[in-house]
């Protein structure tokens, strides 16, 4: 992908890239430590419960912000605008997702785990339409959020139309948030484990409002352009992490997504995203580490389970710490290669074809690096 995610005249917000990189690494750590059994006691458990859920939830907020920031003021609700948008979004997600799905299927065949390996699931995953049917169908670890992301993209043009005026955008966010509250109250039992309720939890009904919140933040950001010293942002992030680690609301994964826990942690996720968006300055070493990782975040999110499984197959499962460290290192290496040789070329090709097919001689919106992952 080309680095400038915003059209001419809109600066790239590098702190959002850094947050995306942090979240991708956090989700990788959550899975890797859980699979190896390390760092699972005491306050760590509260932190993992929070991070495993809201690391992904925050990606929806960032994605909504990025899409609204890039497309605000652009002729999206036209034939050319819609074709350009959906084609580029599809090609941002599809090449890596289909490659990952093929590898996941090969792993299942290799380990004789054939549950969910059928033509129906293959068609739904390779078309990226599974989020409209059932995001929880077996395919790729973490793949459910990509299915929900596609649903968010489908709704984006209509939501963008509502964001132009104060009352419609407030109404859009309020209606979608109310739908999520009603859904969790109706479908999720706070006293039960989350795993048996996973299909209900991952429904787009429960997540579309997060995407809309991100869009709302983009409109607010462009209207107000807040400025604050960097120390304020760092202090805010420290407070959020302390709450996540110490809060009894994160005692179980189900508690984080129901009742008061849901309300508190959604507000914290939105606050963390806003701090990142509005931040004026980040430390240079921090930028150098996490900004590139932010560009690799989609690959990190999808590929870290394969790095873990491959290392397990070669016998590292008996050495948890070594297994975890090599999984992280291997994932970062694979993700850098994936971005350079698969993701970026695919996006550049899609942009050229869009200009050729949909709008010859017309300048369309540059495709963004800001996929949710």
Image (cartoon, rainbow, N blue to C red):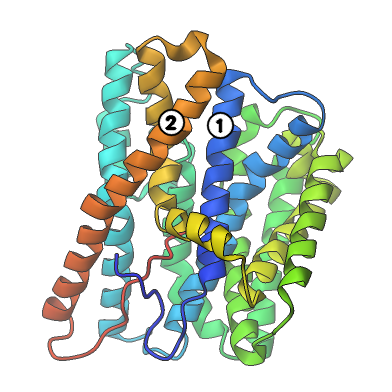
* Residue 231, horizontal then vertical, whole percent: 76, 69
Disc number placed over residue 31 in the picture, else none: 1
Residue 39 versus residue 176: which sits nearer the camera? 39
Residue to which mark 2 is pinned: 305
The answer to whether marks 2 and 1 mark residues whose Cβ atoms lie closer than 8 Å is yes
User: Dot 1 lies on which element?
Assistant: helix
Residue 60 showing in the rendered view: no
> In this image, 136 relative to 172: left or right?
left
Quadrant in which residue 345 is drawn = bottom left
In the image, residue 91 above or below residue 166: above
Residue 116 versus residue 187: which sits nearer the camera? 116
User: Dot 2 lies on which element?
Assistant: helix
* Residue 103, horizontal then vertical, whole percent: 28, 31
> In this image, 5 relative to 214: left or right?
left
Q: Residues within 10 Å of mark 1 (few under 14, many from 20)?
A: some
| Residue in the image at 14% along x and 72% along y | 353
Q: CA distance from mark 2 to mark 1?
A: 8 Å
Disc number placed over residue 182 in the picture, else none: none
First in residue order: circle 2 vs circle 1: 1
Q: Quick one: quadrant of the C terminus?
A: bottom left
């Amino acid at each position: 992908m080309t680095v400038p995610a915003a059209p001419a005249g809109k600066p790239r917000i590098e702190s959002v890239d850094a947050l995306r990189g942090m979240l991708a690494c956090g989700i990788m750590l959550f899975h890797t430590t859980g699979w190896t059994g390390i760092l699972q006691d005491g306050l760590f458990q509260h932190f993992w419960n929070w991070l495993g859920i809201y690391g992904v939830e925050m990606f929806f907020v960032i994605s909504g912000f990025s899409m609204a920031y890039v497309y605000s003021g652009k002729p999206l609700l036209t034939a050319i605008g819609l074709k350009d948008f959906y084609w580029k979004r599809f090609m941002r997600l599809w090449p890596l997702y289909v490659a990952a799905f093929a590898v996941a299927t090969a792993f299942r065949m290799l380990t004789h785990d054939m549950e969910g390996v059928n033509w129906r699931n293959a068609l739904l995953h390779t078309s990226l339409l599974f989020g409209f049917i059932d995001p929880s169908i077996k395919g790729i670890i973490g793949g459910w959020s990509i299915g929900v992301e596609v649903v968010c993209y489908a709704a984006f043009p209509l939501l963008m139309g509502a964001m132009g005026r104060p009352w419609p955008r407030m109404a859009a966010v309020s209606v979608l948030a109310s739908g999520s509250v009603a859904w969790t109250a109706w479908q999720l039992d706070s006293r039960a484990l989350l795993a048996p309720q996973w299909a209900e939890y991952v429904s787009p009904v429960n997540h579309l409002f997060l995407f809309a919140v991100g869009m709302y933040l983009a409109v607010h950001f462009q209207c107000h352009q807040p400025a604050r010293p960097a120390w304020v942002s760092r202090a805010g992030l420290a407070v959020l992490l302390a709450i996540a680690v110490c809060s009894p609301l994160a005692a179980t994964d189900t508690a984080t997504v129901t009742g008061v826990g849901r309300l508190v942690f959604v507000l914290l996720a939105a606050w963390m995203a806003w701090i990142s968006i509005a931040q004026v300055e980040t430390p240079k070493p921090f930028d150098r580490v996490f900004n590139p990782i932010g560009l690799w975040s989609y690959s990190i999110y999808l590929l870290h389970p394969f790095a873990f499984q491959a290392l397990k197959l070669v016998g590292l499962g008996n050495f948890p710490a070594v297994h975890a460290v090599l999984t992280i290192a291997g994932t970062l290496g694979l993700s850098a290669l994936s971005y350079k040789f698969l993701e970026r070329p695919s996006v550049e090709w899609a942009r050229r074809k869009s200009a050729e097919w949909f709008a010859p001689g017309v300048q369309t919106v540059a495709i963004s690096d800001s996929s949710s992952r």
